[in-house]
């Protein structure tokens, strides 16, 4: 069983910063990739950023230069440093991990419970 616990969201003024985190626990053999997605009210969930086991990163155009995804392998924890926040960044942010629970298991995708980020103008 694997659990993901997110924290670090909140309310911030435009131009401010937040750093949500996503801590994974349980039967984790290896993490292939980690990603952050977001979903604003009335909109579909969209990809924000991803990072692979080799630390290769990918960002949506609307966050490039403002957000940075990172991971601490020893802690099985991922982070999303969000700078220069805009009101349009307001959404629930979800972390997503693709991992294996043993050396013989296939890869599975897990989702965090989401953390609310609200940016006021």
Image (spheres, rainbow, N blue to C red):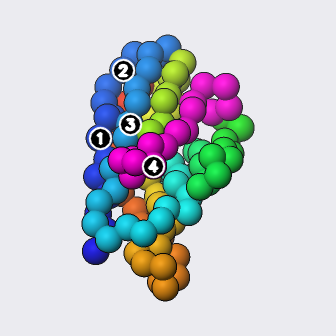
Residue 119 image position (x, y, % from top left): 41, 25
Tag 2 and tag 3, C-beta contact below 8 Å? no
How packed mark 3 is, by other alpha carbons closer than 10 Å (few <14, some 14-19, many 20 or more), is many
Tag 1 and tag 3, C-beta contact below 8 Å? yes
Q: Which residue is mark 3?
A: 20
Residue 114 visible in the current orientation: no
Residue 108 image position (x, y, % from top left): 48, 75
Q: Secondary structure at mark 3?
A: loop
Q: Which residue is mark 4?
A: 73
> In 3D space, how far apart are the residues under numbered discs 1 and 4 (Cα atoms)?
18 Å
> In 3D space, how far apart are the residues under numbered discs 1 and 3 (Cα atoms)?
6 Å
> In 3D space, how far apart are the residues under numbered discs 2 and 3 (Cα atoms)?
13 Å
Tag 4 and tag 2, C-beta contact below 8 Å? no
- Image side of residue 114 versus residue 82, left or right: left
First in sequence, mark 1 or 4: give its number. Answer: 1
Magenta residues span 63-77
The residue at 46%/58% (across/down) is 96
Q: Which residue is mark 1?
A: 7
Q: Which mark is residue 12?
A: 2
């Amino acid at each position: 069983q694997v659990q993901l616990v997110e924290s670090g969201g909140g309310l911030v003024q435009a131009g401010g910063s937040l750093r949500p985190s996503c801590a994974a626990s349980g039967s984790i053999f290896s993490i292939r990739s980690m990603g952050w997605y977001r979903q604003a009210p009335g909109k579909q969930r969209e990809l924000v950023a991803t990072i692979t086991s080799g630390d290769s990163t990918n960002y949506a155009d609307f966050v490039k230069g403002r957000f940075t995804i990172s991971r601490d392998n020893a802690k099985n924890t991922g982070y999303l440093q969000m700078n220069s926040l805009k009101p349009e960044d307001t959404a629930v942010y979800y972390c997503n991990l693709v991992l294996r629970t043993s050396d013989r298991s296939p890869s599975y995708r897990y989702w965090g419970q989401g953390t609310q980020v609200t940016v006021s103008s």
